[in-house]
Amino acid sequence: MFLFTHPFVCLFVSRCSRKEACEKWAEPLHFSTELKQCVDITVTPDNMSVTSVSTQLSVKVANVPNLSAGVTCVFEELTESPGQVQAKGQILCMSPSLRDVPSVTQGYGDKRVVKLSLKSNETGLKFITTDFIFYNCSVLQS
């Protein structure tokens, strides 16, 4: 039995692996043995009303390999759209439009949490996921 004494993370595919099993492990930010080097994500804004039109979101990622091959923004089974890769780990994504978001009032209550993922165009795999909230103020009582 082999025990890992440190985490080994193939960063671009978000999985633990041995170094040799991680494609391009020798390139910067593709493989890490330190948790502080794991991919991090921040989305602004991180929520929106279900009645809002499609909105541009700023997605900030840290500790990622070169994203020059591009990324796709994936909102669960709702939508996929190309992400616009900017400088310094910023990616612009469009939120789903009103027609793409199932009504929050149909069994979801006042909000629906949707998984927003970034998918590498290089590998075709999702490498980071975070929660994005669609809220419906009309079902809240004041």
Image (cartoon, grey):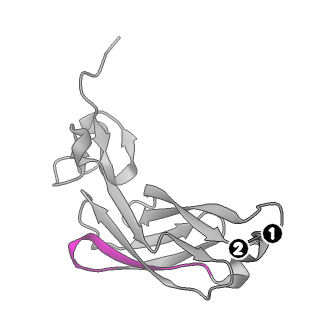
Q: Earlier in the sequence, mark 2 or mark 1?
A: 1
Mark 2 falls on what kind of element? Answer: loop
Q: Is residue 84 left or right of residue 97?
A: left
Residue under the image location 21 percent in, 73 percent down: 88
Identify residue for label 1.
105
- Indicate which disc residue 122 carries: none
Which one is nearer the viewer's eye here, 79 or 43? Answer: 43
Per the image, label 1 sits on a secondary structure element best described as: loop
Determine which residue is flagged by label 2: 136
| Residue visible at 82% across and 60% down in the picture | 107
Q: Which residues are magenta?
A: 85-96
User: Where is the N terminus found, in terms of image quarters?
Assistant: top left
Circle 2 residues within 10 Å: few <14, some 14–19, many ≥20: some
Most extreme residue toward the top is: 1
Q: Residue furthest bottom?
A: 53
The location of residue 46, given as percent across then percent down, is: 48, 69
**Quarter of the image that includes the C terminus:** bottom right
Dot 2 and dot 1 residues touching (CB under 8 Å): yes
Q: Quadrant of residue 92?
A: bottom left
98 or 127: nearer the eye? Answer: 98
